[in-house]
Image: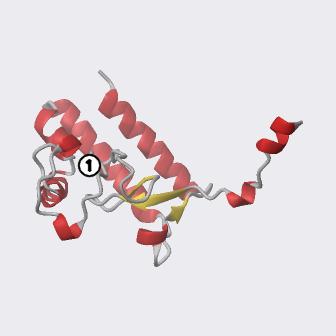
Amino acid sequence: MEDEEFYDYDEEEIDPKRFPCPCCGYPTLEIQNYGYEVCILCGWEDDGQRDDQADKVWGGANQEYSLTAARGIFKQHFLGYHDNKVLKSQKREAVIHANKRLMEAYDQLEKPENWATEGISLGTDKKWEEVFKQEAALGTIKYKK
């Protein structure tokens, strides 16, 4: 019985959220600030770099790219900096197409005014269903051999 008490929780207290990627700005991250998560859309690893240091190259998982450079590549090519270098043409086009579909799904979400700092709660409505569907589709394309 002790184990049951240990795992007893109120479901209303759990509020899974998404936070914006510092590179592409879309709600792809589950941990706010410095979670070292990799954005499924642009490939940026959230290592804590923000606007005040965006022009600096920190190295690490983001390699020789500054946040500013990675943002520029994503904005111009709809690809993450790493994908822009390594993807072959057919897969590259499929990833670009999937990225655009996912961006459209994210754009349909209703975002509270303070979502960039407070996060956006995951919902169970059709808009979130579409986001999850497009994220899965992108993952399948990106990581298929």
Q: How many marks?
A: 1
Which quadrant of the rendered structure holds the C terminus? top left
- Could you tell me residue 126's position as x and y percent? 57, 55
Q: Nearer the viewer, residue 103 or 61?
A: 61
Indicate the position of residue 116 as horizontal and vertical percent values: 41, 70
Q: How is the image coloured?
A: secondary structure
Q: Residue at x 45, y 64 (%)?
A: 108
The amino acid type of the residue labelled 1 equals Trp
Q: Residue at x 12, y 50 (%)?
A: 65
Q: Is residue 132 left or right of residue 29?
A: right
Q: Which is more toward the observer, 19 or 110?
A: 19
Q: Residues within 10 Å of mark 1 (few under 14, many from 20)?
A: many
| Observer-nearest of 68 and 53 | 53
The single residue placed furthest to the bottom in the displayed view is 113
**On the image, which quarter does residue 136 sit in?**
top left
Q: Position of residue 17 (x, y in %)?
A: 53, 58
Drawn side of residue 7 relative to residue 114, left or right: right
Q: Is residue 66 above or below residue 115?
A: above
The quadrant in which residue 19 appears is bottom left
Q: Give the image location of residue 50, x and y in percent.
A: 25, 64
**Residue ranking furthest to the top:** 145
**Residue found 26% across the figure and 37% down from its top:** 94
Provide the secondary structure element on which disc 1 rests: loop
Q: Residue furthest front?
A: 2
Q: Which picture quadrant has residue 34?
A: bottom left
Asked whether 78 or 37 is in front, the reply is 37
Q: Quadrant of the N terminus?
A: top right
Report the residue marked by disc 1: 44
- Residue displayed at 33% across by 45% down: 38
